[in-house]
Image: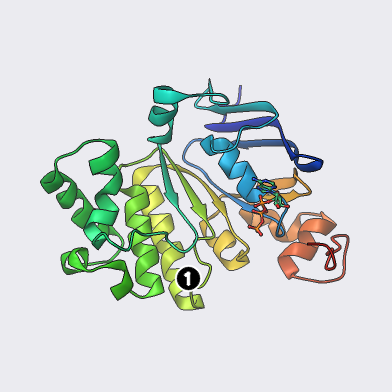
Amino acid sequence: MAEPGHIVLTDVRKSFGPKHVLNGVNLSVPKGHSLVVIGGSGTGKSVMLKCILGLIHPDSGSIRIAGEEVVGLRGKARDAYLSRFGMLFQGAALFDSLSVWENVAFGLIQGRHMARAQARDIAIEKLGQVGLGPEVGNLYPAELSGGMQKRVGLARAIAADPEIIFFDEPTTGLDPIMADVINNLIVDCVKRLGATTVSITHDMASARKIADDIAMIFKGEIIWQGPAKTIDHSGNPYVDQFIHGRAEGPIQMDVLKP
Ligand SMILES: Nc1ncnc2c1ncn2[C@@H]1O[C@H](COP(=O)(O)OP(=O)(O)OP(=O)(O)O)[C@@H](O)[C@H]1O
């Protein structure tokens, strides 16, 4: 029998009022694999990630992590669940009032109640893994370039050695060379940790680099999933249109609707 997925979504549905956003999402990510979810704006990528994180409750369906049902977890069980995740947000989302090392160590100090000195050592080590020297630890986010901020965000995402990491648009806003540097660091850091990852991106160069598998979401359903190296021969006209960025094809933009 095939190994059950580390992250398994079964028929996950979510509507906001009359708006059906997730229409029965089915997805399985094996342990240690990197899945990249692609899809147009407003197709439900962020809502799906928020459902996995428990920030949005699905109307129905099942989300299992390592075999355990996580829909509906509350209180301490939910806190313990969230501590298994690392997250790199769009724009890095660093705290401006904290130094770089304090940003990286935030979850260790606040979440795990680690002593500051020990947390600082780990932060400096993780900064080293993303190519930043210890001197950067004492700077503040406003003193860093966008690329350095992403590196710090990545160091923070891996600080607690999470078993699952989410990357939300990890290369948005970066020039192509810095984007490639971040992609390489993501691949290195994830391999070192052996973490299972789910990433959202519009950047196909990034998707090809960091994904083992790619899934395409369209109108709240996964319409294709396969190994990244097969995406050019998916045989799916929606995938073809998306990866080549063509205005013509089965995906029609509702440019007049909000
Ligand atoms: N809390 C909410 N209340 C009402 N509607 C919501 C809520 N969250 C998301 N939506 C709607 O769900 C749809 C999907 O949103 P989502 O953020 O998942 O899109 P996305 O695929 O991540 O898009 P993008 O690539 O632009 O970030 C959108 O139409 C959005 O307006």
Mark 1 within 8 Å of ligand 1, using the beta carbon: no
Give the image's coloring scheme: rainbow
User: In the orientation shown, which residue stands out farthest toward the left?
Assistant: 117
In x, y percent, where is residue 60?
A: 70, 27
Could you say which is closer to the camera, residue 134 or residue 196?
Answer: 134
Residue 52 vertical position relative to residue 129 in the rendered view, above or below: above
In x, y percent, where is residue 41?
A: 70, 59
In the figure, residue 195 lies in which quadrant? top left
Q: Residue at x 87, y 70 (%)?
A: 248
Q: How many marks?
A: 1
What's under tag 1, amino acid-wise? Ala
Q: Is residue 21 left or right of residue 186?
A: right
Q: Is residue 214 visible?
A: no
Could you say which is closer to the camera, residue 152 or residue 237?
Answer: 152
In the figure, residue 150 lies in which quadrant? bottom left
In x, y percent, where is residue 245?
A: 74, 70
Q: Residue at x 69, y 48 (%)?
A: 44
Q: Is residue 141 left or right of residue 12?
A: left
Q: Quadrant of the N terminus?
A: top right
Q: Secondary structure at mark 1?
A: helix
Residue 151 vertical position relative to residue 190 in the rendered view, above or below: below
Residue denoted by label 1: 179
Q: Residue at x 39, y 71 (%)?
A: 147
